[in-house]
Amino acid sequence: MSGVFMGMPSLPVFGDGNLHIDEPFPAAAHRELGNTQMRANLRHATHTIRDKRLKVVGELPDWEELRDAGAATKNQVMANLPALLEEFEKNFTARGGIIHWARDADEANRIVSDLIKEQETTEVVKVKSMATQEIGLNEYLEEQGISAFETDLAELIVQLGHDKPSHILVPAIHKNRTEVRDIFLAEMPNVDPNLTDEPRLLAMAAREHLRRKFLSAKVAVSGANFALADSGTLAVVESEGNGRMCLTLPETLITVMGIEKLLPAKEDLEVFMQLLPRSSTGERMNPYTSLWTGVTEGDGPQNVHLVMLDNGRTAALADKYGRTALNCIRCSACMNVCPVYERTGGHAYGSTYPGPIGAILSPLLTGIKSEENSSLPYASSLCGACYDACPVKINIPEILVHLRGEDVDSRRETKKLPSQMDLMMKGAQWAFSSGKNLGLLEKGLPLGKLAAGREKKIKRLPGIAAGWTQSRDIPAPPAQSFRDWWKKDHQPAAATTEQEK
Amino acid sequence: MKIALFATCIVDAMYPQTARATVKILERLGHEVIFPSGQACCGQMHINSGYMDEALPVVANHVQAFEAETYDVAVAPSGSCVASVKHQHPVLAERCGDAALKARAEAVGAKTYELSQLLVDVLGVTNAGEQLGSHFPHKVTYHPSCHGMRSLNLGDRQLDLLKSVGGIEVADLPEADQCCGFGGTFSMKNADVSSAMLEDKAKNIESTGASLCSGGDASCLMHIGGGLSRTKSSTTTLHFAEILASTMAEPVSVTGEVFVGKGGKR
């Protein structure tokens, strides 16, 4: 399918594919917390990237201005998305590219699969891409008898290990190098049986394995970091150069990209090429940045396709309080600094997008009512480290709170029996909406003091509060509230001062 | 200056000595403190748990209570509650479609300060030992709570005030900027993750060898203190206002007991 549907806008279409958590987050987190090896690997890795990022960000005197510029550009893109998409389509098509529009994951998968079949091949090489993971492309292609080979080293580790990525930039962050060696020994054809866990040797083994694929593949599939509307140019930012092999060697190149990746003009790359590498790998500049504009005769891929993916992005754009989540440039700085992610790892979030950005993006794309995605916005202590680190200033804590509101409101509609939390909040509403009510409630403080007993602590509470007392005591309440003391015992300031003198 | 005290619900009900210490500090500086009697809570628990409809009357009550009095500035011994008053109240009012409340909330928020902000930026207190007579001869460490640090950009205001207290020894807390894991109802809904975060915070605190951990938010200190108490640690928690209020004549103990005159305790 091609061309834009220009009819009356209807209700937003939510996204599907790998955007869900299929059990409540606390249950998934409980399981992952038990994996001590994973936690040790993750702690080491996230702390290393954090330190690197802080160092290179600290070098730039205008870092805050760059963040402001990045946020402003992205806000402008979202406000003018339809016009920019048309501009991009016009320029991309004029330079020999073919554009396809996909409403959801299924439509995108079918488009890509049909394009591969047209080339009469059953093997494709892949550039690391979040969009194709989001739509579950590899799994779909496998059903169609097409093998997709991941060429990014970490994606390769995950694929060979029959595992799932746990980080958007460092998909195998949950594995250490000994575990990587074991995967290579078990799964990589023709691997040296004496392979050690030395990083250089591991990289060489992967290189040899991949080189064969690069030279034989007729089709490559990629994602894109940026799309420049003024010229119809696509860009991929990477570290290894394996992406560039895919982008240049095969005859056919199929790119799958979310519609929010647009930038108005090439000048905007000045800002984003400073923001992205520093925020993601903690480098001043990434080793390989590839840009391509349509088809160049006799040079590189001669069939250049782009699948423009909605998959819930229009729905997210329609959410006034949530839409800035679309500003995300997939740098992963938020997950690297997140204390929750550091402890649970990415698998606990279920979706392709883990960490703080995933906790807002997944429910925004799928709708809050989809499977267990309503549990994701609660997967945060709202500490705000993610907002501080975000290069495009997405106020993640504020959007988390907004989505919690959406969740509570959506559960109100179902009119089920009120939960313990509902009742607690109703009770607290009464107590906290008047000084008189709170004062009245505080008359009961001595009772709490009594309950705390001789140890002066409360060690066990029932119901939802039991979560608190699983690892924390509550001190005995005081005999008298401040309010009560103020009314009865507070001496006017002057008198106190006199006494002290 | 006439200063309206926003005690915050948790301090009012669970840690009255923190509010009393706040009053004491401000009165010692010669200011008049008032306590708007209509106040209850900032509504942060409701907002952060997604209960916006229930939060609205709580927020409206706060705005009304602080509009009912005349004063120069309002102060609260909490970074989190002040961040809520300043940032969350207008957003909630807008979300609930109440433009008038939004404007009123912004006006109240603009006059509201966190205690160290008021002391340093408005009242010019930079040396607690000299200007407040603060004396606290103990080894302490300090946890900067997230909302004060990131929403209010308090920087080192609380820590610097602590360091200027007479007789005190302040030990640096490793990984100080890491959240303690409280997060309001997060500590109940995601109790396992919250506990894992708390465990690391407690380990870092104990590694300093301090007899207590201070901070600027009673809720985080209750969380950290509750974890330390559960593991039978001898380390406690104490709000920085109580340390600033401690003097040679009226010393405060590491557990927050105030001694008046000779041996009298209250």
Image (cartoon, rainbow, N blue to C red):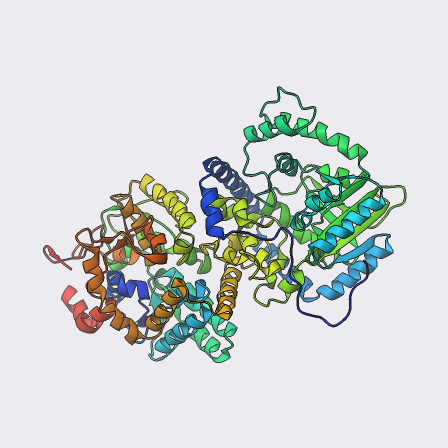
Q: Is residue A413 above or below residue B265?
A: below
The N terminus of chain A sits in image quarter = bottom right
Where is residue A178? Give x, y as percent. 55, 28
**In this image, A273 relative to B135: left or right?**
right
Q: Is residue A314 above or below residue B232?
A: below
**In this image, B119 relative to A210: left or right?**
left
Q: Residue at x 33, y 79 (%)?
A: B69
The C terminus of chain A sits in image quarter = bottom left
Which of the 4 quarters of the picture holds residue B157? bottom left
**In this image, A493 relative to B162: left or right?**
left
Which of the 4 quarters of the picture holds residue A183? top right
Q: Residue at x 49, y 66 (%)?
A: A411
Q: Residue at x 20, y 65 (%)?
A: A480
Residue pushed farthest right? A297
Where is residue B149? Give x, y as percent. 43, 55
Where is residue A482? Give x, y as percent. 24, 67
Where is residue B171? Give x, y as percent. 32, 43
Q: Nearer the viewer, residue B204 or A254?
A: A254
The reply to whether residue B117 is visible in this rendering is: yes
Q: Nearer the viewer, residue A354 or A323?
A: A354
**In this image, A195 relative to A485: left or right?**
right
Q: Is residue B32 above or below residue A268?
A: below
Q: Nearer the viewer, residue A290 or A246?
A: A246
Which of the 4 quarters of the picture holds residue B161? bottom left
